[in-house]
């Protein structure tokens, strides 16, 4: 096979850098399933990896892109055959394995998901790790007793990829969603996705008290830092806070009171290493009764591989809005 293009990240004596290279499929990290990539997507983690602003890769060099969707070209695992439409999110992509920002990717069969009925390849990447994470957060909360009766779910970082998809999915699942965002210009849009209320994050005045009047039944937190610390005293008894992000900081200050008096639960959401059975559960929901109703409007941008560096810059500046799908090959 002739060479193909890849957005490859290196870190060596010449420094941290990412750019386009020609490579051969033989040079890809090993796996049973060779895929011609149709789409990938841009997640905050991709922006950290592609710029070196966060330590995402755990070996170098690797192709970037934590999400991939495409068609199987060859498989040594009988579970997959040429022409099958498949997807993969996380699972070491752009951490320890070559990722989806390339015309070909070689996947491990154990982490390769047949494209669920009800989703196109493109839709699966509008969802990507962002949609997977939003749905995983809700499943964790529900497995831990979260019901709509506990009260509204606060979604922080609500204008971003995980945030917008969470608004759509959680409202579809019957929860009142209170979207917390600094982008007040977009509140009407967030409401049109399903948010019952929008709260300006700059106007949120956390009291700093260990416990405060209950305001939310639970939360999905994309932001971390002071936002997470401020939310905990406002959560209803036995409510859940699913914590997935660090867009606003990694350290948070708080007290044990919400946990020991109200039984509030802090649930970790780690999409990349999710076990196969849970992955299948998440994709069944995302392609079924939790399929977001507004996927096309949430996919605010379709980028080419060449446009990635610009998209990363916007995202890390906090300027992203919705999801960017990366179109790799015509399909
Ligand atoms: C889509 C998902 C997301 O968006 S998640 C958010 C984006 N991710 C990040 O921002 C992570 C950026 N990385 C870091 O900030 C650091 O790498 C760190 C804080 C996670 C760890 O750095 P540190 O220098 O404190 O520790 P070590 O590198 O020495 O590792 C300690 C220990 O942890 C294991 N480990 C580190 N990273 C990962 C990982 N991504 N997955 C699994 N395990 C990880 C590492 O192997 C070490 O364990 P050991 O048993 O000693 O090998
Ligand atoms: N744990 C996991 O498995 C996953 C974690 N994440 C994390 O979730 C977060 C969101 O990811 P994406 O939706 O892909 O990113 P995104 O860039 O699309 O969304 C981030 C949102 O946070 C907002 N934001 C940025 N800085 C902020 C600050 N200082 N205070 C408050 N809001 C701020 C942005 O305006 C934007 O709305 C990131 O931290 C990402 O690393 C994302 C996917 C999976």
Image: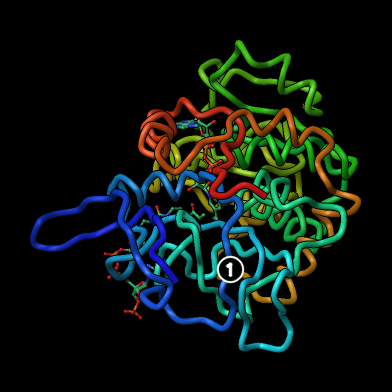
Q: Quadrant of residue 145?
A: bottom right
According to the picture, the residue beneath numbered tag 1 turns out to be 35
* Left or right: where 83 falls relative to 246: right
**Foreground residue among 47 and 149:** 47
| Residue drawn 30% across the image and 45% down it | 51
Mark 1 Cβ inside 8 Å of ligand 1: no
Image coordinates of residue 192 in percent, x first then y, are: 80, 21
Q: Is residue 262 visible?
A: no
Q: Is residue 173 visible?
A: yes
Q: Which residue lies at the image location 38% right of the left edge and 61% below the top edge? A: 63
Q: Seen from this angle, which residue lies furthest top?
A: 185
User: How many discs mark residues in the rendered view?
Assistant: 1
Relative to 209, residue 84 above or below: below
- Under circle 1, the secondary element is strand
Residue ID at (59%, 41%): 325
Neighbours of disc 1 within 10 Å: few (<14), some (14-19), many (20+)? many
Tell me residue 225's x, y (percent): 44, 41
**Vertical order, 325 against 257 (above or below):** above
Figure quadrant of residue 287? bottom right
217 vs 61, nearest the viewer: 61
Tell me what residue is drawn at x 77 percent, y 21 percent. Answer: 191
Q: Position of residue 47 (x, y in %)?
A: 40, 44
Q: Position of residue 113 (x, y in %)?
A: 70, 70
């Amino acid at each position: 096979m002739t060479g193909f293009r890849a957005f490859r990240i290196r870190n060596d004596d010449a420094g941290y850098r990412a750019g386009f290279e020609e490579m051969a499929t033989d040079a890809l990290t090993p796996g049973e399933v060779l895929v011609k990539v149709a789409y990938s997507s841009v997640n905050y983690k991709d922006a950290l990896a592609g710029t070196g602003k966060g330590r995402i890769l755990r070996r170098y060099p690797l192709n970037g892109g934590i999400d991939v969707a495409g068609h199987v070209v060859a498989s040594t695992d009988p579970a997959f055959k040429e022409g099958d439409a498949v997807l993969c999110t996380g699972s070491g992509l752009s951490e320890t394995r070559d990722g989806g920002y390339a015309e070909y990717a070689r996947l491990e069969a154990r982490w390769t998901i047949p494209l669920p009925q009800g989703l196109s390849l493109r839709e699966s990447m509008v969802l990507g790790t962002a949609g997977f994470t939003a749905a995983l957060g809700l499943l964790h909360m529900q497995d831990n007793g979260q019901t709509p009766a506990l009260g509204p779910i606060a979604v922080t970082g609500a204008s971003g990829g995980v945030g917008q998809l969470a608004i759509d999915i959680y409202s579809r699942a019957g929860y009142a969603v209170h979207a917390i965002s600094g982008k007040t210009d977009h509140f009407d849009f967030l409401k049109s996705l399903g948010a019952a209320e929008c709260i300006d994050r700059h106007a949120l005045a956390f009291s700093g008290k260990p416990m405060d009047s209950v305001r939310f039944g639970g939360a999905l937190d994309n932001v971390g830092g002071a936002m997470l610390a401020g939310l905990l005293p406002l959560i209803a008894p036995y409510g859940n806070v699913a914590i997935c992000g660090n867009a606003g900081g990694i350290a948070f200050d708080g007290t044990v009171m919400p946990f020991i008096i109200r039984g509030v639960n802090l649930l970790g959401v780690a999409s990349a290493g999710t076990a196969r059975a849970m992955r299948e559960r998440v994709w069944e929901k995302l392609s079924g009764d939790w399929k977001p109703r507004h996927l096309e409007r949430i996919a605010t941008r379709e980028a080419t591989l060449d446009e990635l560096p610009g998209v990363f810059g916007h995202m890390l500046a906090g300027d992203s809005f919705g999801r960017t799908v990366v179109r790799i090959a015509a399909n």
